Structure formats: structure tokens, C-alpha cells
């Protein structure tokens, strides 16, 4: 491609350097021209560690948005600031890739969607798990009707003892919650997307902080600061959809389980079922054939469709490429903000139900 899409990044923490920087550097038609972080040293470190030369460095994101050459902005900040930074960027004429979750609250996420619709600028949310081989394959199976009418789904994001102890992960004010809004959001997005069902009717939820005040935890990243642990360590939801389908949501950073599962789904339809509840194989599809129970296990080690023609087919690269192709070709973004809005709506309802002890009903 002749033209370069110029990009500005707001937020230079772990998700920037661990995911987005890698994805953007794999796209030769993308040029990162500006970095911003309220801790400006992080922006300089990101520039230097990624050999970005003389990119512009900002401490105030509003100054970055004044650069009219920037076409796309990545919002990679704590959850609390997703909404207002995204809206400001859209209003400044930028397309936006915002990291998951869409926002802390449904109202904030809805305002983001409305800003995108009002400005005509594209907005997508970073749910890269959709681009894993097993989920691309399973999505095609679902679209082809191989599972039939999918009436039950499990969205699973269960860690045994893997509480993130850095940044603001444990801060309810900045993040809006713990494992449910952090990793449960990926599993819920996958489940609703695969089911092609984004119309919830009611939610019942529970959340717990049973382990968050313990010490000597055996945590993967060392003991956390119990005084700063202001979020849940596990949360669970039961969702009834408008069409009668049921979705269960399970999320934890710390839970006494033997077998952790993250970004995992189980689907049950009237023709067959599927799950990603084991790492070997990555995907199991079950059905009945000739009066016998059958389990099918696709082999993802032997190639497949060339979803991206570059050097990498890793999920974050596929996700970024699809978003930028939608911008260049003026087509729909693959991860639609309308879908991400429903994920946020359900997450918020689980928290509300857990707090009040009552079901939450949607109009």
C-alpha cells in the first residue's frame, strides 16, 4: 500500500507494549507517530524500547489529538478513562481502537457508541481472542448451523492464583472491578459472538472477596497488597437472553480450583456442542452420527485459511489488520461497538445484582 496510516497511542503501559505495539509493528502500512502517557517516562521508554525514532511524546492526550495527521488513536488506559478519551478522540476526527472492556459502565459505553455514530468515525474494542484459530473455526461452524440452535453457553475465565499485582488492576475506582471486568469480559464476548446473540433479558450475579485479604497466597506474581485489593477475587453470573437461551459467566483471579481455564467457552445446541475447555485438543465438537456419540477435534497445526498475508497470523495482528482494513476500505469493523456495549451492560448487571442481591431486568 502506498499511503501510511498514521497512529497515536494513548497509554503506554503493559497492554500497549505487550499487545498493541507488537501488532502495529507487524503492519507495514501503519506508522506510529505519537505516544502519550500521564507518566511521560513510560512514553519515552516505549519509544526507545521499540526503536520508534523521533515520534512525538505527550503527557496530555488532548495535545496529541490536535495533530491533524493522526488518523487512528489507540486508547490503552485504565478502564475509568476509556469513555472520555475515546469520545474526545472521535470528536477530534480520529478512528479509535479502545482496549477491552469498552468502559466501566453501560452509560459510558453507550456514550462512546453514540459519539462514533455522530461523528461517522469507526470504533472497535480490543477483543483479540476472537481471532484465535479455534474460535475462527468454531464461528464458521456456528454460522453454518452445525450446532443448530445454541441455547446454552458458558463463558469461563478462571485462574487459580494469578492476581495481577501491578498497575491499577486492584483499584476498583480505576478499573470498575476485578477478574470479571478484566478477563471475564473476553470469555463473555466470545460466547455472545459465537452464539450470535446480543439481546439479554435478565441477569443474576454474585461476587466474592474470599481470598483477597489473605497472605502467603501462592500467587503467580507474588503476594498482593491486601490494603489495595478493593475488587472481587471471583464473580459469577447467570444470564437469560430474550430468545430463552442461557449464558453462565465464571471469572476469577484467585479461586481454589485445580484446572484454570481462561478465554474458554462451552456451547450447547440442538444439533451438537463445542468447547475449548482443554488445551489439547484446542477445540472439541460433539454430536451424534449413525447413532453413536462423536467428538471431532480439528487440527490447527497444519495450516488453514490465510486470514492475513503478512508475516504473522497471531490474534492481535489479525485483529489490528482487520480494523485497519475496515478503515482503508470504509467497511464495517469486525468487532462492532454495539456488541461490546452489550458485554459491558451484562458485566455491570452482574456487579449490580451481586451488590443488591436482586436480579437485574433489561427493558
Image (cartoon, helix red, strand yellow):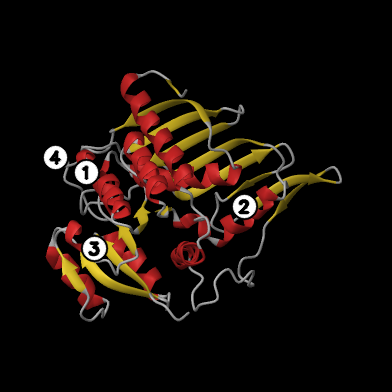
Question: Is 100 left, or right, of 331 in this rendering?
Answer: left
What separation in Å lies between label 3 and label 1 (alpha carbons)?
16 Å
From where the camera sits, is residue 218 visible? Answer: no
> How dense is the environment of label 1, judged by Cα within 10 Å: few (below 14), some, or many (20 and up)?
some
Q: Nearer the viewer, residue 150 or 108?
A: 108
Please, what secondary structure does the residue beneath circle 3 have? loop
Question: Is 49 left, or right, of 227 in this rendering?
Answer: right
What separation in Å lies between label 4 and label 1 (alpha carbons)?
15 Å
Provide the residue designation for mark 4: 227
Among the two numbered marks 4 and 3 on one chain, the one whose residue lies closer to the N terminus:
3
Q: Are marks 4 and 1 in contact (CB under 8 Å)?
A: no
What separation in Å lies between label 1 and label 2 (alpha carbons)?
33 Å
Residue 26 at x, y percent in the picture: 42, 75
Residue 246 at x, y percent in the picture: 57, 31
Among the two numbered marks 4 and 1 on one chain, the one whose residue lies closer to the N terminus:
1
Q: Quadrant of residue 220?
A: bottom left
Among the two numbered marks 4 and 2 on one chain, the one whose residue lies closer to the N terminus:
2
What separation in Å lies between label 4 and label 3 (alpha carbons)?
26 Å
Among the two numbered marks 2 and 3 on one chain, the one whose residue lies closer to the N terminus:
3
State which mark lies toward you, 4 or 1.
Answer: 1
Provide the residue designation for mark 1: 174
Amino acid at each position: 500500500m502506498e499511503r501510511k496510516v498514521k497512529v497515536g497511542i494513548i497509554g503506554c503501559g503493559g497492554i500497549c507494549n505487550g499487545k498493541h505495539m507488537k501488532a502495529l509493528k507487524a503492519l507495514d502500512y501503519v506508522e506510529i507517530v505519537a505516544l502519550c502517557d500521564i507518566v511521560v517516562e513510560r512514553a519515552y521508554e516505549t519509544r526507545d524500547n521499540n526503536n520508534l525514532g523521533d515520534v512525538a511524546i505527550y503527557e496530555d492526550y488532548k495535545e496529541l489529538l490536535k495533530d491533524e495527521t493522526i488518523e487512528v488513536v489507540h486508547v490503552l488506559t485504565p478502564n475509568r478513562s476509556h469513555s472520555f478519551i475515546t469520545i474526545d478522540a472521535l470528536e477530534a476526527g480520529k478512528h479509535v481502537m479502545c482496549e477491552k472492556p469498552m468502559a466501566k459502565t453501560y452509560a459510558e459505553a453507550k456514550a462512546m457508541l453514540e459519539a462514533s455514530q455522530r461523528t461517522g468515525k469507526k470504533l472497535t474494542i480490543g477483543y483479540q481472542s476472537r481471532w484465535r484459530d479455534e474460535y475462527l473455526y468454531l464461528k464458521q461452524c456456528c454460522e453454518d448451523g452445525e450446532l443448530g440452535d445454541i441455547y446454552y453457553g458458558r463463558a469461563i475465565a478462571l485462574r487459580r492464583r494469578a492476581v495481577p499485582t501491578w498497575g491499577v488492576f486492584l483499584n476498583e475506582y480505576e478499573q470498575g472491578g476485578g477478574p470479571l471486568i478484566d478477563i471475564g469480559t473476553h470469555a463473555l464476548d466470545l460466547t455472545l459472538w459465537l452464539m450470535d446473540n446480543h439481546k439479554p433479558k435478565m441477569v443474576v450475579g454474585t461476587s466474592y472477596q474470599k481470598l483477597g485479604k489473605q497472605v502467603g497466597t501462592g500467587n503467580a506474581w507474588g503476594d498482593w497488597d491486601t490494603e489495595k485489593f478493593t475488587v472481587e477475587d471471583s464473580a459469577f453470573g447467570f444470564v437469560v437472553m430474550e430468545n430463552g437461551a442461557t449464558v453462565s459467566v465464571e471469572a476469577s483471579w484467585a479461586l481454589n480450583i485445580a484446572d484454570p481455564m481462561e478465554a474458554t467457552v462451552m456451547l450447547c445446541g440442538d444439533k451438537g456442542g463445542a468447547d475449548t475447555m482443554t488445551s489439547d485438543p484446542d477445540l472439541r465438537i460433539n454430536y451424534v452420527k449413525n447413532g453413536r456419540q462423536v467428538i471431532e477435534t480439528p487440527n490447527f497445526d497444519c495450516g488453514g485459511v490465510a486470514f492475513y498475508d503478512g508475516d504473522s497470523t497471531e490474534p492481535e495482528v489479525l485483529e489490528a489488520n482487520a480494523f485497519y482494513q475496515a478503515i482503508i476500505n470504509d467497511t464495517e469493523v469486525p468487532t462492532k461497538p454495539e456488541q461490546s456495549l452489550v458485554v459491558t451492560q451484562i458485566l455491570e448487571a452482574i456487579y449490580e445484582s451481586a451488590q443488591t442481591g436482586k436480579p437485574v431486568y433489561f427493558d
